[in-house]
Amino acid sequence: MIARRLRWTLAVLVAVIGVVALTLSYEDDTGVTAPRSSASRASTPARCTEANLDGLTPMVPGGDHKELVQFWRGIVGPTYRAACTEDYRRLARLLEFEGSPEYFSTTACSGCTSLEIVAMWRDEYGFRGTDLSQLLEARPVQTQGGLMFRRGNAVAWFARGTHGTPGQWTGFYPRCDLEPDCATYASDTP
């Protein structure tokens, strides 16, 4: 009887340890297995609100401010929501243009798929989706071609689009300071 209870207790203990081990590491939808830090377990879930679009002014005199904000919300919003909810597959799809990340500006990743680019951000820079959502909560800089968000060393760009190309997320550098082209372009933006 005591041996049976001991085996049962041992089996429950092994099951609990297995669940804890699975909880402490995870495989996200990019196929990358990464340990979760105690800081991420202790933190509260991200509060997804909206990207910051304060301070935007119409480029055309007499343009409608509300219409401008609504336009940018349609472009920046999907990236913000995917980042805030840490939907890495959705982020990867958003950096593709016509099915390819070829025209997306980021840290060099020769021949990488969009999922590999997101995995590179995570592996090499410790990127988390919530980092990007917090970046998009910073006040943007408006340029003739679009918006630039900058927070610390991270920079993201969104293009307004042209007649043949829709507005879209066009660039993200988790460490702009390490990339000469990014650092130059970001410093040239007011």
Image (cartoon, rainbow, N blue to C red):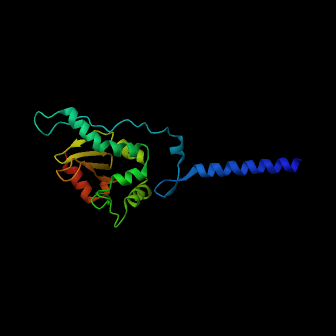
The residue that appears at 38% across and 35% down in the rendered structure is 49
The residue that appears at 50% across and 44% down in the rendered structure is 40
Is residue 185 toward the left or the right of residue 52 in the image? left
In the rendered image, the vertical position of residue 151 relative to residue 98, given as above or below: above
Residue 100 found in image quarter: bottom left
Residue 187: x and y, percent?
22, 50
Query: Is there any visible trace of residue 135 in the rendered image?
Result: no
Residue 127: x and y, percent?
41, 51
The foreground one among 90 and 143 is 90
Is residue 2 toward the left or the right of residue 100 in the image? right
Residue 72: x and y, percent?
25, 41
Residue 108 found in image quarter: bottom left
Query: Is there any visible trace of residue 160 in the rendered image?
Result: yes
Q: Residue furthest left?
A: 61
Q: Residue furthest bottom?
A: 111
Q: Quadrant of the C terminus?
A: top left
The residue that appears at 14% across and 35% down in the rendered structure is 63
